[in-house]
Amino acid sequence: MILLKTVNLRKQFGETRACDGLDFVINRGEFLSLVGSNGAGKTTLVNLISAHLQPDSGQILLEDRDITFTTVAERIRAGIARSFQIVNLFDGLSVFDNVALSLFSRDGKTVKMARLADHDRDVRRETLEVLGQFGLASKAAALAGGLAQGERKLLDVAVAYALRPRLLLLDEPTSGVSTHEKAKIMDTLTSVVRGGTVTAVVIEHDMDVVFRYSDRIVMMHEGSFLADGTPDEIRANKDVANILLGAPLTA
Amino acid sequence: MTAEAQPLPNRTLLKLVAAAGLILLVSIVVPSLIGTYQLQLVIYGLIAAIAALGFNLLLGYTGLLSFGHSAYFGVGAYSVAFVVAHLGPHSIEFYLLVGIPIVAITSALFGYICVRHTRIFFGILTLAISQVLYSLALSLYWVTGGSDGLRVPRPALLLGLLDFSGPHGFQLFIRSYYYYVLGVFVVCVVLMWVIVHSPFGKALQGIRDNEVRARFLGLRIRRFRWISFLVSGTFTGVAGILWVPLNGLTTPDVLYWTFSGEIVFMALLGGFRNYTGPIVGGLVFTYLKTYAVASTEYWQLLLGVVLVTLVLVLPTGIVGAISRAGQRLVRRNAVK
């Protein structure tokens, strides 16, 4: 069942066609990886879906509802959340508060001025639950700015996940971390996604990670889709192999 | 900062309440220990602390540096002067009743314009707006008294129950006004503490730390900044309302940009990353300026040297430095 689709989606930066008429489908409940070389258009596509950028033309449909020109806040309310390639956290707040703020925002409680944040039992319980899922419960009181890179990546995803989105867009969740931490992040991520009702789209460069964890892989090249299939189908695709090895495409 | 960042367990809250209670107890006995002049200085200090506390909601918690908070202090002071001149009762409660809505509306209006920008553009806008008010106060002399300003006589307190027109009226007024300002100060400190520890306060701190992430949590950044500006300006305006009956006169000087600079100085002096920093900064600055002015004609140079030293040696301010020293001491004891 289709959760989100784009119709002839275009975005151009000067002469560069970052998204060149993309017809893209995300199915409900899948763990989808977007792969491709730098400049292929992966981040632009995620930016368009999350309203970080507006398209030049085309449509974005969430369960057949046109959300092409809705704001970031409206997309979040519709159930689309994201993390960033460069970790984006509230470094001056504690790990607990980073996640709690996400929950306050989701529940429309950030307007409350006359009540102490720490005294909201529901948010407190759910925050600790999310931190537990991501293995960060022991770090709850630490400042987010003081965490190690792997923990920061996990917290970045946890903050987005705490919004309880239907579609979670993750831009390189394992970049800049060790191989051991990569496996930990991806194991945590997949267990969280598969345990709930979340659909995940992950931009990833590490093909070992992609093949191991994805239900479906979409390969992009110069603003277009080059291949779309299961890990086995993608592994057998010669064009994908050539792109990954830097060789020219087949005719 | 660290202390604020962590969730407050009940034991910490208890310690905090106990410490605040002790300070309050000392504050209550202060008038019986010091003379009228010194008590007057303490009142000025408490008023400065309220102004800096309001200012710091913008700087410390929202990440916006205003160079124009003299505008809200001045609007508070002038609104009292207008009440005295044109309306009726010379009662501090009436001044607050009329002054607070005027300051809130002014802050909301100017804030709406200023929060459309951030960083240097925000700072320049706030500065420009306060300078416009300063120019108006100077040029509209038939309304504002021009450079002579407007006089404000000693008001009655507690809805006219305490009147100070008799002999020894001044001494009695200072003593009573101290308790009055202390009461308002406590209310302001508690209110602001609740605000910065509320979900709204957490959202402000989130916006301060990372605007992009805050936007992708669905927070409406500009609206939060606007409300923060409104609350901040109103607190500073309350300080202006309390200041003018003590000073007996308001002149355009309180709207001038150098006065905004003094409020920024207070926050830096105490430490804008700590909740209590601006309070300590407001009190210390009042004494520092008073004694600097009394001891040398080059008092501005002296304050300048203090500011430079502060930025270089104590970048986290007095409270930040004490807090760090305390943490180091605890760590050293733990190692032993």
Image (cartoon, coloured by chain):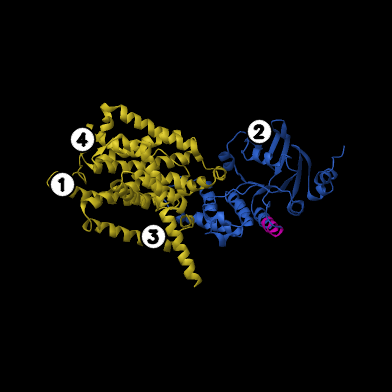
Image hue for chain A: blue
> Could you tell which of marks 4 and 1 lies nearer the N-terminus?
4
Q: Output the chain of dot 3.
A: B
Q: Output the chain of dot 4.
A: B
Distance from disc 2 to disc 3, alpha carbons, whole Å, reads 52 Å
Q: Which residue is mark 3?
A: B16
Q: Which residue is mark 2?
A: A55
Q: What range is drawn magenta here? A: A179-186
* Rendering coords of residue A176 (x, y %): 68, 52
Task: Left or right? Give the position of A180 relative to B14.
Answer: right
Q: Residue at x 35, y 29 (%)?
A: B135
Q: Amino acid at mark 2?
A: Pro
Q: Are marks 1 and 3 in contact (CB under 8 Å)?
A: no
Q: Which residue is mark 4?
A: B88
Q: Amino acid at mark 1?
A: Gly
Q: Residue at x 31, y 29 (%)?
A: B138
* Rendering coords of residue A191 (x, y %): 67, 57
Q: Which residue is mark 1?
A: B169
State yes or no: residue A50 in magenta.
no
Task: Left or right? Give the position of A171 relative to A130.
Answer: right
Q: Are marks 2 and 1 in contact (CB under 8 Å)?
A: no
> Could you tell which of marks 1 and 3 lies nearer the N-terminus?
3
Q: Output the chain of dot 1.
A: B
Q: Secondary structure at mark 3?
A: helix
